Amino acid sequence: MTDDFSPARRRLVQNASLGVAAAAMAGSTFSAVAAGAAAPSAQAGVGGTRGLVDPRGLFPKPPFVVQSQTWPGLASKMNPPPDHGETSYKGSGRLAGRKALITGGDSGIGRAVAIAYAREGADVAISYLPEEESDAKEVVDLIRKAGRKAVALPGDIRSEAWCQQLVQKAVDGLGGLDTLVNVAGRQHNYDSILDISTEDFDWTVKTNLYAMFWITKAAIPHMPPGSAIVNTASVNAYNPSEYLLDYSMTKGGIMIFTKALAKQMIKKGIRVNGVAPGPFWTPLQVVCGQHDEKLKTFGGDTPMGRPGQPAEIAPIYVQLASSEATYETGQIIGASGGAGNP
Ligand code: NAD
Ligand code: MG
């Protein structure tokens, strides 16, 4: 077990760490939190800056307890629990009045984005699998606590018909759509191409590429000029793991899809960008996303020496959706603790 912090100390350092993660982004709105003050309303700002915080030791480091869950996994069952910014993210109206659909918004990176968007003033629809209802319910509660509308949309995005309904239900529930964040994904490790069945290959490609294509295609007609699309690629799009052949192929596809679509969509005034995460501590990794040995040392091979927490990447998604980033399109922004290429 690597988390050697007491709960109180961990809360303090987590909250402090978020300041540094967010300070990298223009206009970032995290704030340092007084010891023990977990509620966002109790956050004590530090004069618009977050002070200096060393990011290296702020979150759990490997070795991690080897653990596994059945697909699709739950954030609530992870050890240590991921930090999605629940107690720390503080918004400042950067997405006021926006209407966002976030796929995979129940857990991991998508949950951190949902929390951040709601606290920045957006109404948020989240898509997830029915098995993830308990994680999704926590996110819905957090969105509503931020005073925003939440729309919960369980269903399997490997179906084109569901992808079309998903977008329509988001539009109906939110009263429009101006922000689409494609986060949902499937990752499974295989030693060899010879171990990947056609069904496995189809599962990965349907989830990561087809669903993104179908959802984006259904969403665009609803999106007015000024809207934003943010896709989720990976460091594996640039430097693929030998154990993630099919997954890496889809992530490279997402990167190129993002760049090509940006060229089309700017003609409609819609910006399209992507994020390329390095190792982040999320359910994806404990449902066969990694070999046991790799899970134990997860994130340890980055210069940072630890995996990222979802809360540390949400500010990039805020920035890319925000109308502050008007010249930003066709870009892939990395967050990988010093590793990776983008
Ligand atoms: P996660 O497990 O929390 O999120 C993945 C989500 O995808 C699930 O919560 C689920 O709701 C959704 N999903 C998967 N299959 C689906 C289906 N058939 N129908 C509907 N929803 C489905 O893990 P995460 O790490 O936050 O993953 C989010 C994204 O980040 C993925 O695209 C992943 O490839 C990418 N990513 C993650 C890492 C990492 O280290 N965690 C690194 C690079 C990229
Ligand atoms: Mg999930």
Image (cartoon, rainbow, N blue to C red):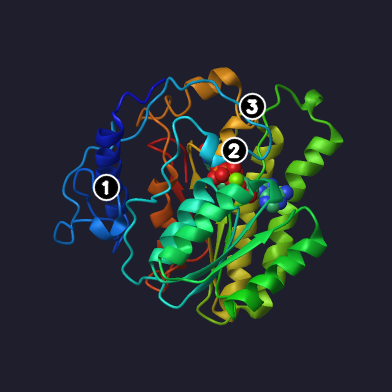
Write down the residue under mark 3. 242
- Given the current orientation, which residue lies at the most extreme left position? 47
Q: Tell me the amino acid under the disc marked 2.
A: Leu
Ligand 1 location (quadrant): top right
- Given the current orientation, which residue lies at the most extreme top position? 293
Q: Are marks 3 and 1 in contact (CB under 8 Å)?
A: no
Write down the residue under mark 1. 20
Q: Tell me the amino acid under the disc marked 1.
A: Val
Which of the two residues, 209 or 14, is positioned nearer the viewer here?
Answer: 14
Q: Position of residue 123 (x, y in %)?
A: 50, 71
Residues at marks 2 and 1, CA–CA distance in whole angstroms:
25 Å
Dot 2 beta carbon under 8 Å from ligand 1: yes
The label number, if any, that marks residue 284 in the structure image: 2
Mark sitting earlier along the chain (2/1): 1
Question: As displayed, is residue 53 above or below residue 90?
Answer: above
Q: Position of residue 202 (x, y in %)?
A: 81, 43
Which of the two residues, 175 or 327, is positioned nearer the viewer here?
Answer: 175
Foreground mark, 2 or 1? 2
Count residues near mark 3 (Cα–Cα under 10 Å), then give few for <14, some for 14-19, many for 20+: some
